Image (cartoon, rainbow, N blue to C red):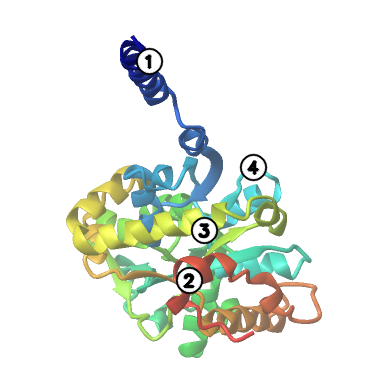
Amino acid sequence: MVANKRIQFWRSFKILGFILFVTCASCTDPTEKSTSILKKVRVASVPAIVEAPTHIAYHNKYFEQEGLDVSLRINPDGKTSLEQLLNDEADIITVTGTPVVYSSLKGNDFAILANIDHSKIHFVVARKDRGISSIADLKGRKVTVMLGTSGQFFMDSLLALNKLKITDLEIVNLNGPAQLKAFVDGEVDAIFGWVPFPLLALQELGDKAILLPSDPIRSCSWVVVATKQYVAENPDIPKKILKALIAAENFISQEREQASIIHAEISGVKNRAASDLFKTMEFGLSLRHSLLLDFEDQARWILKHGYSDAKKIPNYLNYIDPDAMSAVKPEAVTLIH
């Protein structure tokens, strides 16, 4: 009798255990549920080829894999993205260093999270059909550049190298898309800018246009930027953004042709010349001491030419936040504090 009761007890115990197992298996683990809720992040990008990692990370859902719900905005230039950041219309942006330096001289503050290393992206294209075949031929000509950007820094550097001054040219201040239209319509004689716009202009006019030599001028920095307040309130998000960009860079190195197609789709730039440039373009996240030197060089250039009312160069170490890069790619952080 006692034995029968014991058997009945163990049978009941096993049934109860099975019920609990099935019930728990059908439940969602609280930890699993919390990680499935994506954090919304507003990212501002541009069509430039250097932004391919951002576009790949978005298209391939690398941001999602890091737990981020990214809304991606494509602006004509990084200067616009920076204005959106300051107006709380974007959370994280990518932009050349020049607008950041200009803005810092106005007293604005930022957290620079990383630099996207890249090959040359700035070029000057001129109207060959108007007798232009060298930088010297631009004297007295009407040229277009977007003031306050890396395009202007590139132009001033190239002019100085060729013993010309900005006052030797007639400057028309336009953004990339407007530069392209003005050049094709014959309203200007040359474009100083970044990919894709000079290469689109070259393609549009064919033999009527010429790519002028500019190789000695190095590429400007291209930085990932947020506000210090945003980083303080969301310390995990910069790391997730950078991890997604690293995944995108790895994809580009392994699937370059497919990456080029994705970049063209996201940026809206379907251009053979840009595609050819993509084949040799190198990408890599870093925070090197050279970034600090680039910012200081650009600040000196701005103050020397009177482009700002500022009296001194800020300490750009105070603008750089190395925590995220140090966590995800420590070997690429060589900044001297």
Is residue 85 depicted above or below 123 in this figure?
above
Q: Secondary structure at mark 3?
A: helix
Residue at image mark 3: 239
N-term-proximal mark, 1 vs 4: 1
Viewer-nearest of labels 2 and 3? 3
Residue at x 37%, y 80% (from the top left corner): 214
Q: Which is closer to the viewer, label 3 or label 1?
A: 1
Label 1 to label 4: alpha-carbon separation: 65 Å
Where disc 1 sits, the SS reads: helix
Q: Label 1 vs label 2: CA separation?
A: 98 Å
Q: Verify CB contact (< 8 Å) between mark 2 and mark 3.
A: no
Horizontally, is 224 left or right of 300 in the view? left
Which callout, 4 or 3, points to the residue nearer the camera?
3
Q: Quadrant of the N terminus?
A: top left
Query: Is the C-beta separation of discs 1 and 2 under 8 Å?
Result: no
Q: Residue furthest front?
A: 1
Place residue 41 in its image quadrant. top right
| Numbered mark located on residue 9 in the image | 1
Upstream in the sequence, badge 1 or badge 2?
A: 1
Label 2 Cα neighbours within 10 Å, binned few <14 / some 14-19 / many ≥20: some
Residue 74 at what x, y percent from top left? 47, 45
Checking the image for residue 89, the label placed there is 4
Q: Determine the secondary structure under disc 4.
A: loop
